[in-house]
Image: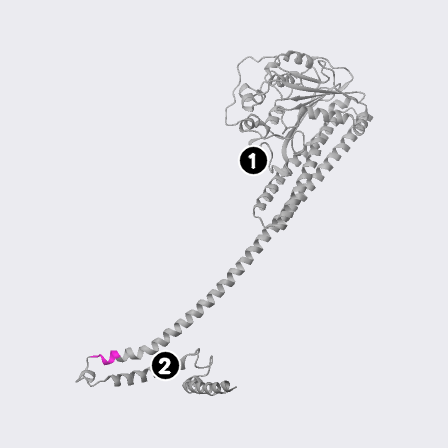
Amino acid sequence: MDFDVESTTSTTDIDQSWRGYPQNQFGNWTPDQVGRSKMLEKCLGNESSTIYWTDVDDDRSFASPDIEGNHGTMVVGSDNEDRFWDILQKERPENVRVRSIFVDDLTSPVLRMLGTTYNIEPFFFTSSINWIPSRYQEAPVNNTGDRKSRYSILDITITLPFVRTLRKDSRSSPTPLTTSSRNQHSGCFPSEWYVYQDPYIHIPTSVLDGSMLFIDLLAIHMIRDVKTSTIISYHPESTWCRTSAKRLNSLMQLVGGSVYWQKIFEKSKDPTLLFLAILWYPLYAWDESFELLYTHVSELESKVLQTNDMELTRDLHVLQAHLLHYRSLLHNFEVSVQFIAKTHNPAMDSSEVSERDESEKLMKTESENLLSEIDRLEKRREMLTNRLKNVMDLAFATINLNDSTQTRELTEATVRDSAAMKQVSFFSETKISYLTMIFLPASFLASVFGMNVGEFSNGGLQTLAHYAEVTVSLTLLTIYVVVTFQTHSTFHDHNAPFLRRAVWPVLTFWKMMYKLREKPAEDMV
């Protein structure tokens, strides 16, 4: 419901025939609400519906009723709509315990006829169309139905999204679709679940060797009655990405051939047990999907151990995100089973006490079996999540280790460069100091002798020899003083005492003479 739009009350006359659904059964559903829910709009693209029937008799046999001479199958188009309506109104044989009606490519007329005949709440169709997980039962009343209908009915509805696998060697594997065909079947998934690199496939798309995972939907409405019950399965489109009505009908036949379920149906007439049997189908689909994911995660772990490809971390995060999404889907699955187990069927109150107790016992046992399997699936999902977290930690640790190695090498190179620059700087400063010692006295004396004072300029008494004598003497004195006060110098030891540094000219002369005396000896040897 859109709360931003004002609700209006329809003033037009309501068609009380099946063509007036849902207003003929639910007056609060105005044409505006029906239009905004897109309940009928989604069915306009289908020209005909294929109906699959299966009856569960009192003798626990599963059979396809011979309707229209087609052995449990009927195609309903615009030319035989009235005939289908007459079949729905026809009284069932008394020995039919449950009748299942699975509809492929649901059309608007078939939707209206089913909704009118069984007084189905429109929310069943809207929640299925919009992929809204839901579960509800409508106002049960002991022994009889709760609404005005030709049947005494007690409705229970489950809309359950689940993950399913499509193997690459499956006969139903899809062929590449064009953009136009993709748009034509865009109702297969909600838009936020599309991955356009592989149309209609739920992320993570291609998992391993071309196999795929995608979201499927199980939408079942059950009318539980004292005498006979009805199961209606909703399939708006017959595409490879959705479980078809034909597939679900064949699974129903397999349930009828199971010795295990035959013994259960022999002990209890509660039709809700058949509802639980159908829920094993999404559970097996979950199990197969996790098996495929386990293989894929193992391969990703192997790739991370062998390579340091950063692109793998993105794949790991994508899988992690969808495993978190699967947690909510599994939780919804668990809540749906608990809802069915706790929702009492008042139609069974008219049965014998022993049969009622046996039915409750069987319902509890089968529900616990399903819940136990769902818990196992959740633990497996947690295991995959932990393995993904572990391999992501390994990937990031490997990357950090490589970064640390590169940082260390860069630091070592920087230290070497710094040492080289320091040494170059030291020698440069030393050379400049020595040059300064040589030229500073000469520059000083040239400045002194160039002064315009009487002592130097009177008669030109100063000579070049006098200038050289004073300059050399002062230069040697400057060199002596500078070297003496230096703690680091090649003329004396490092950090030598001051007295030792003061006699450095004598020590230097002695070392030179010592080396000259040793050199002839080495030449003679």
Q: Farthest right residue?
A: 354
**Residue 429: quarter of image:** bottom left
- Tell me how far mark 1 sits from mark 2, CA to CA: 82 Å
Q: Quadrant of the N terminus?
A: top right
Amino acid type, callout 2: Ile
- Judge from the rendering whether residue 26 lies leftward or rightward of residue 433; answer left or right: right
- Judge from the rendering whether residue 100 lies leftward or rightward of residue 491; answer left or right: right
Residue 447 among those drawn in magenta: yes
**Residue 446: quarter of image:** bottom left
Name the N-terminal-most of marks 1 and 2.
Answer: 1
Residue denoted by label 1: 197
Amino acid type, callout 1: Gln
How far from the left and from the top, in percent, is residue 495?
46, 80
- Judge from the rendering whether residue 505 lies leftward or rightward of residue 359; answer left or right: left
- 325 above or below 177? below
Secondary structure, magenta segment, majority class: helix
Q: Which residues are magenta?
A: 446-451
How far from the left and from the top, in percent, is residue 107?
61, 19
Which class describes the residues within 10 Å of circle 1: few (<14), some (14-19), or many (20+)? few
Which mark, residue 58? none
**Residue 243: quarter of image:** top right
Residue denoted by label 2: 479
> Of residues 492 and 53, which is closer to you in this image?
492
How far from the left and from the top, in percent, is residue 362?
78, 30
Residue 28 among those drawn in magenta: no
How far from the left and from the top, in percent, is residue 158?
66, 28
